[in-house]
Image: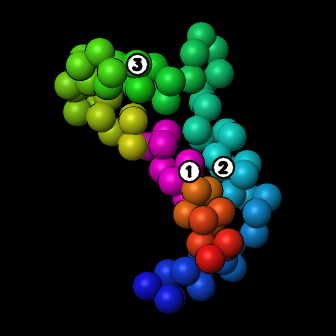
């Protein structure tokens, strides 16, 4: 776990933030995929494998950013 934390803390902030903004909110019009998939999840209509993959694909940058924020403070 220490190696993972060390690698995560070595990542520069700017690329992590840019990846989170670009991939997390793409496409911007008509609405971000992540927002669409979260709405589908809350409605119980997130059943297609492609939609589930989309949810993970567009949410992993937020997980990375949160981990960097939380482990950086510890």
Write down the residue under mark 1: 61
x%, y% of residue 63? 51, 54
Looking at the image, tell me whether mark 3 or mark 2 is earlier in sequence order. Answer: 2
**Earlier-in-chain disc, 2 versus 1:** 2
Q: Is 58 covered by the magenta stretch?
A: yes
| First to last magenta residue range | 57-64
- Residue placed under numbered mark 2 in the picture: 19
Colouring mode (rainbow / by chain / secondary structure / one colour): rainbow
The prevailing secondary structure element of the residues shown in magenta is helix
Q: Position of residue 22 (x, y in %)?
A: 67, 39
Q: Residue at x 60, y 65 (%)?
A: 70
Estimate the x, y position of residue 30 in percent, counting from the top left: 59, 10
In this orientation, which residue lies closer to the viewer: 5 or 22?
A: 5
Can you say whether 44 is above or below 60 in the image?
above
Q: Label 2 neighbourhood size at 10 Å, few (<14), some (14-19), many (20+)?
A: some
Most extreme residue toward the bottom, as rendered? 2
Mark nearer the N terminus (1 vs 3): 3
> Is residue 41 positioned above or below 2 on the image?
above
Frontmost of labels 1 and 3 is 3
Q: Secondary structure at mark 1?
A: helix
The quadrant in which the C terminus is found is: bottom right
Residue 51 drawn at (x, y percent): 32, 28
Dot 3 lies on which element? Answer: helix
Q: Residue at x 43, y 85 (%)?
A: 1
Q: Is residue 6 above or below residue 74?
A: below
Q: Give the residue number, with chain letter if any, for mark 3.
A: 39
Secondary element at image label 2: helix
Rendering quarter of residue 15? bottom right
Magenta residue check for 70: no
Mark 1 and mark 3: Cα distance apart in space: 19 Å
């Amino acid at each position: 776990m220490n190696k993972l934390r060390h690698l995560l803390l070595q990542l520069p902030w700017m690329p992590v933030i840019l990846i989170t903004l670009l991939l997390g909110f793409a496409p911007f019009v008509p609405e971000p995929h992540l927002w669409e998939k979260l709405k589908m999840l809350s409605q119980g209509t997130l059943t297609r494998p492609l939609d589930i993959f989309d949810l993970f694909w567009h949410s992993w940058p937020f997980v990375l950013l949160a981990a960097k924020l939380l482990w950086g403070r510890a």
